[in-house]
Image (cartoon, helix red, strand yellow):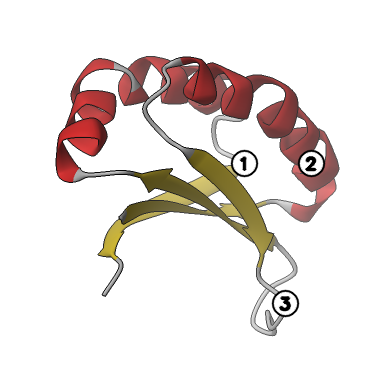
Amino acid sequence: MLIFNITFNVESRISEQWIKWMKTNFIPVALETKLPKDIKVMRLLNEKENEDKTYAFQFHFKNMEDFMQFEMQHRERISDRYQMLFRGKLVEFTTLLQEV
């Protein structure tokens, strides 16, 4: 199993609006591709350096083939929507993890 993790640092003043939008728009669209088997949303609890909120979206994929298909055919289209709506109010980075 692979986990594709997207970590977002979101301005506090829009974090509630953003997380609601992500749960009602971003996640359903990603799941419609039928490639991620599950998506979990986590919030970082031990933030001390800034007032912004940090969230991790963990996409669970059965194998590398499913992940690559999602990455090549769907991710940019899905990500463009939140990047346009929340431009300048968040930063993100990604990691790809393998279960051992």
Q: Label 3 is placed on what type of residue?
A: Leu
Q: Earlier in the sequence, mark 2 or mark 1?
A: 2
Q: Label 1 is placed on what type of residue?
A: Lys
In-image side of 74 versus 64 (left or right): right
Residue at horizontal 33%, vertical 22%? Answer: 76
Residues at marks 2 and 1, CA–CA distance in whole angstroms: 8 Å
Residue at horizontal 74%, vertical 23%? Answer: 24
Residue 99 placement: quadrant:
bottom left
Q: Label 2 is placed on what type of residue?
A: Ile
Q: Which residue is mark 2?
A: 14
* SS category of the residue bearing label 1: loop
Give the vertical position of 40 relative to 100 (above or below).
above
Check whether the beta carbons of the residues at disc 3 and disc 2 lie within 8 A of each other: no
Residue 94 position within the rendered picture, expressed as x and y whole percent measured from the top left: 34, 53
Q: Which mark is residue 45?
A: 3
Residues at marks 1 and 3, CA–CA distance in whole angstroms: 20 Å
Instruction: Indicate which label's residue lies in the foreground, 1 or 3.
Output: 3
Say few, some or many: other residues with alpha carbon within 10 Å of mark 3 (under 14 / 14 to 19 / 20 or more): few
Q: Earlier in the sequence, mark 3 or mark 2?
A: 2
In-image side of 47 versus 98 (left or right): right
* SS category of the residue bearing label 3: loop
